[in-house]
Image: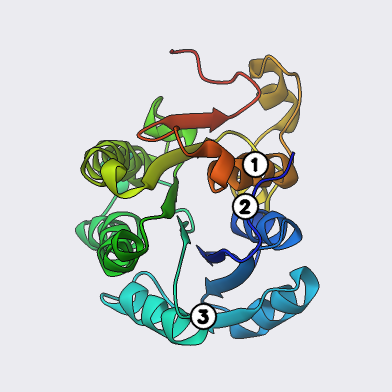
Amino acid sequence: MELGLNGKTALVFGASKGLGKAIAKTLSEEGARVAICSRNEELLEKTAEEISAGYFVTGDLKIEGDAKRVIKNVMNEFGKIDILVTNTGGPPNAIFQDTSKDQWKDGFQNLFLSTIEAVQEVLPSMKKNGWGRILFVTSVAAKEPIGVLTISNGFRAGLLGLMKTISSEVAKNGITVNALLPGYTMTERLKDLNVDEKKICAQIPAGRIGQPEEFGDMAAFLASTRASYITGQSLACDGGYLKGY
């Protein structure tokens, strides 16, 4: 299927590894000019070469205003951003009682405010061009809370409401906004959580952990010209893990 991504420009946050890297790689393979961002410059440079990204820039979404700075740099380099993928690393694991106020503040900036900053910065250009794709990478935890992921459970659920609000406002401008909910996927983050793979697989109807490339394929389709009538949706790539509708 031709996705119509040739000539489109994309910025993927958190793309030096994991799900962000998988999305950036697929977009690049489909013909888009891709810019990637993360905190680790050495790893970012290596990834950019590996996936043939056209541009990379370091940025820390925990720092107020850094998302806007990154977008301005990419706009200066490419002249426009057609596709924005907001993606952040997971916050520390802890039950509610053990989560400090500072951790809540960091999580709010990293998971929520950085997304607001990025979207506010990129929307004027997308509206002017009459075309845009915005993808929020969240988690299945946004719909069904996962134990000890307290901060993630709280803020990622809020992102779904934000996504729905923005999508309704900009649909008339040819801009779609959707949320992508990855389930258990074989990334560095999953290893950090130290989960029992056999136990997790038993909870997934597909009977296995997902691969980053599968998530990247879904993201690329939603970023394409072929997905122009899909907006305001929360789409899971989880092997059937979510129990709700």
Choose between 42 and 93: the one closer to the eye.
42
Residue located at (27% from left, 77% from top): 65
Figure disc tally: 3
Up the image or down, 19 lies above or below 149; here it is: below
- Whether residue 200 can be seen here: yes
Task: Kindly report the distance in space between the C-alpha atoms of the residues bearing marks 2 and 1.
Answer: 7 Å
The outermost residue toward the right is 50
> In the picture provided, is 153 more to the left or to the right than 90?
left
Residue 19 disc label: 2
Q: Secondary structure at mark 2?
A: helix
Q: Which amino acid lies under the numbered mark 2 shown in the image of this protein?
A: Leu
Report the Cα–Cα distance between label 3 and label 1: 26 Å
Residue 142 position within the rendered picture, expressed as x and y whole percent measured from the top left: 38, 34
Vertical placement of 223 versus 119: above or below?
A: above
Q: Are marks 2 and 1 in contact (CB under 8 Å)?
A: yes
The residue wearing badge 1 is 215
Q: Which residue is mark 3?
A: 78
Question: Closer to the camera: disc 3 or disc 1?
Answer: 3
Within 10 Å of disc 2 (Cα), the crowding (few <14, some 14-19, many 20+) is many
Quadrant the C terminus occupies:
top left
